[in-house]
Amino acid sequence: MARLQLMPIGTEMKTPLPAFWEELNEKDQNLDVKRNEVKAGWGEKYQQRVHQKGKRTTHERIAALADNPDQIFPVGTFVNDGEIFGGERGRPSPAAGVITSFVKVNGLWTMVIANDNTVASGSWWPQTPEKIIRAQKMALKLRIPVIYLVDCSGLFLPEQSKTFPGATGAGHIFKMNSVLSAAGVPQIAGVFGDCIAGGGYMPIISDKVFMTEQAYMVIAGAALIQGAKSQNLSSLDIGGADVHVHLSACADERVPDDDTCLLRISQEIQKLGSSAADYYRQGFAPQPPSFSSEELNAVIPASGTQPYDVKEVISRLVDDSLFWELLPEFGQEVMVGVGRINGLYVGLIANNQMLSDHPHQQGQKRPGGILYREGVSKISIFSRACNDDGIPVVWLQDISGFDIGTEAEKQGLLGYGSSLIYTNSTNETPMITVLLRKASGAGYYAMSGLPYDPVLQLSTPITRLSVMEGRTLAIGAFNSKLDDNFQIITEDEEEREAIAKGMKEVEDRIEQDMDPFKAAKQMDTDEVVKLSEVRAYLEAAVEMCYQTYGTRRIKNPRIWSLHDLSLATGGLR
């Protein structure tokens, strides 16, 4: 069997840095501002209110729980971004009122799901259930423990119709609690305060439930019971730790305060043992790339029309900037191969933005960022081999779509595309998708977009997610008014102005819809991160893929199918 040989990739950054570097830095600063706004919840007044009760804010709880507070990886930060709920006196719901983050606790990656107690006492808003369910599904796919930090006053009732009844409404959270339990995924809950109605159901199926002295779990709170049964009771009387630890057995332990509860949760995680990731590193210690990830802002132009060398991107993501490229001469519009991230093997699939050789017309070139028959076939073969070998796949998307026209149809591109879609739909190995820049049309689907259930999908401040660009869509919408060169054909000046105005309105609206924060707001992507942060997110996500053992196939590198593929296609000598 051939020895796996990773080869150096990438080059040192040249100076002066390109002009677009400053543009991307400005976008990163805007991202920081928006993150800080979300983290503030409803503001300092509500943070102080939490502290006056002797409790920590939700973000403080997560930081105290983490092994390293600087290595917390949020997902769903911008859900409901800018939305106002509740009519004329409405309020925003930053992050949909719930914080979901990958957090390492006692050496194990966990998914933490925590109600933001500075936003309407942790109420559930429109999209709160969907966000919680998405986090639970991530944990299920990765088989990592789930920690619930519950401080929830139930549904935000003025918007109950948007959170209660649907297939992915609040009730589906409890189904996912059950599915996680049935799959053997550890679930631990800490109840810190309000835990009403659905909030009361959420922790019950967990393997371990802790309650602080300020916590209570009730199907209905004191106000509702007083109205319905004329009983003068407090919520603590109805469902405090006295009741649920000592009488109902719905909770396991009572603890005096937030800090003790977090300590006990951490101690429970410690009982689960150590991560298997070091075992699967095969003796390789994690190494940073030879070229800094901070340089990615100077590698990838903000404009989708400017090309760049995807090798320079990969070299700033993989350990030691070492990479094994497969099938380099075939389907050159995409690049596939294997590298290590955090000392662990991953397959990488990336769109090539440069011109590539036309396989059927000698001397001709084809534009990059488009999927042709050969590239689609190449991705399918590689993706299946990675799935067979148990190697997680990282997709680096910058795609304008599929090839179109008579040649594409005659070659059966639809059929090859369907084969790739089948592959992505049935793969069991974890897949992680990064939308570097363009994510357009069916190419977005084919490159394992969110509809194909990647474990995690990341966008960047320059990601543009859409069926097509605004200008292209405007041309399609007004096609009957344009000539073959897309010029307005009317001689009537008023009509010309009206058409031009209409096209501009369509283009502007589509461009706004393509904003990455709009996608994150609608849960069409999991998180918006800086290009310089992609490597850190991948380090965490890839380690999670290898944390557990015995739950999926992970082959020893000596017996990879990829070796056979390389030999059969002339890649080994």
Image (cartoon, grey):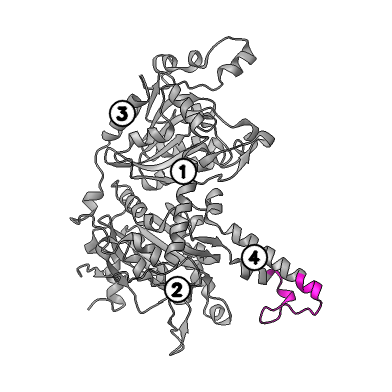
Is label 2 in a helix, a strand or a loop? Answer: loop
Q: Earlier in the sequence, mark 1 or mark 4?
A: 1
Q: Give me the C-alpha separation between circle 1 and circle 4.
A: 31 Å
Tell me the crowding category of disc 2: few under 14, some 14 to 19, or many 20 or more residues within 10 angstroms, Cα based.
some
Is there CB contact under 8 Å for labels 1 and 3? no
Tell me the crowding category of disc 1: few under 14, some 14 to 19, or many 20 or more residues within 10 angstroms, Cα based.
few
Q: Earlier in the sequence, mark 1 or mark 3?
A: 1
Mark whose residue sits in front, 3 or 4: 4
User: To which residue does mark 3 refer?
Assistant: 263
The N terminus is located in which quarter? Answer: bottom left
For this rendering, which residue is in front, 52 or 174?
52
User: To which residue does mark 1 refer?
Assistant: 36
* Residue at (26% x, 44% y) in the render: 275
Is label 1 in a helix, a strand or a loop? Answer: helix
Mark whose residue sits in front, 2 or 3: 2
User: To which residue does mark 2 refer?
Assistant: 307
Residue 90 in percent (x, y) is at: 64, 36
* Magenta-colored span: 477-497
Q: Give me the C-alpha separation between circle 1 and circle 3.
A: 27 Å
Residue 167 in the figure: left or right of residue 49: right
Residue 211 in percent (x, y) is at: 40, 22
Q: Earlier in the sequence, mark 3 or mark 4?
A: 3
User: To which residue does mark 4 refer?
Assistant: 507
Residue 494 in the figure: left or right of residue 184: right
Can residue 237 be seen in the rendering of this structure?
A: yes
**Residue type beneath disc 4:** Glu
